[in-house]
Amino acid sequence: MRAVVVREHGGLDRLGVEDVPRPAPGPGEVCVRVRAVALNHLDVWVRRGVPGHRFPLPLIPGSDIAGEIDEAGPGVDGWNAGDPVVLAPQVSCGRCPACLRGEDPLCPRFAILGEARDGGCAEYVVVPARGVFAKPAGLSYAQAAAVPLAFLTAWHMLVARAGVRPGELVLVHAAASGVSSAAIQIARLWGARVLATAGSPAKLELARALGAEIAIDYRTDDFVRAAREWSGKRGVDIAVDHVGAETFDKTLRCLARGGRYVTCGATSGHEMRSDFRLVFFKNLAILGSTMGGMHELATVLEHVGRGALRPVVGAVLPFEQVAEAHRRLEGREAAGKIVLELPPAGAPGIVTGA
């Protein structure tokens, strides 16, 4: 099969498209013919490398996958060849106490597709059957691929970790990113109000269209002052932030007494500096979050299926243009997810190149 393979860390030239052996499903697994794979910043980190972290190279990236069942392994029931599916972006054992509590990210064997094991930037991928879900009717494969990681992450951040409640005020940074565009919608679904930040008029317009009450340009406006004015000087109840170093200190200053800061990443840098007297004097909570439980993804897909939540796709490119997709992602050019499409079974083959 054709696959993107990262054999060593570096620039866009490390994204080679090559022939590799097609995987076969084992007991309890399914093989999926990939039709679309959405990119995340995780894909950029896998390609560039992260100081102090070792990725199992060579590695096929890609965590967000939609496609069709190709073959079911021994012991798998309920799936037939050709069934349209969307995949959980993670694997876990399903048997340990954490998994049985629905806290899959705490499983000792937890792994993210495309980071700790081969992902879906390929014609085929093999995954455990427990991570396979029916594709919501009415969604294209590109739209379906834009759902799993972003919406699962945002749901777990707001609902499980921060405990969002109706009427609360929520600050969401980087509003046009996958996680944040999902977070705006989830906060509104739970009856909360949203102030969003973004870096261009198009992204601000998207934030408002998704339900943000106020959207401000973080490059030209003071979001701390905006949050203070919007909240009547009280501060916001929850801040959703995966920007990191650039926003951490100011974001803590936006929080009301008893406020919750929840983060799933740090795209601008991982060193967080602030006056931690704010934390104990104001009884703040700083919450880390990674992915979520399989039951949470099932809930998300139900809401997507009925139209209460919708994926935002900023660009769709052919699979062989993976390097261009990475360039756009790094340059923050897209308002929404960047998705790579693969042809259906029996269509002309993929052109070699990156």
Image (tube, rainbow, N blue to C red):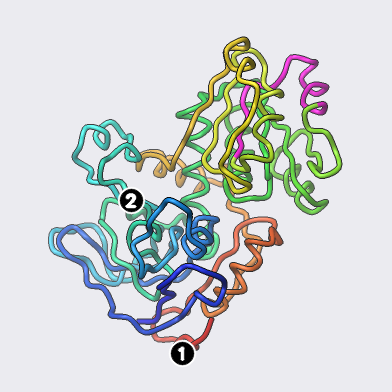
Q: In front: 70, or 99?
A: 99
Q: In front: 218, or 175?
A: 218
Magenta span covers which residues? 225-241
- At x 36%, y 67%, the residue is 57
Residue occupied by mark 2: 111
Q: Is residue 238 magenta?
A: yes
- At x 62%, y 31%, the residue is 273
x, y percent for residue 32: 33, 68
- Using the image, tell me which numbered label, if any, was put on residue 348: 1
x, y percent for residue 47: 49, 65
Question: Residue 80: in sight, yes or no?
Answer: yes
Classed neighbour count for the residue bearing mark 1: other residues with Cα under 10 Å, few (<14), some (14–19), many (≥20): few
Looking at the rendered structure, the number of numbered marks drawn on it comes to 2
- In what quadrant of the picture does the C terminus appear? bottom right
x, y percent for residue 101: 28, 31
- At x 64%, y 27%, the residue is 274
x, y percent for residue 286: 53, 25
Q: Earlier in the sequence, mark 1 or mark 2?
A: 2
Q: Secondary structure at mark 2?
A: strand
Outermost residue on the top side: it is: 281
- At x 59%, y 17%, the residue is 279
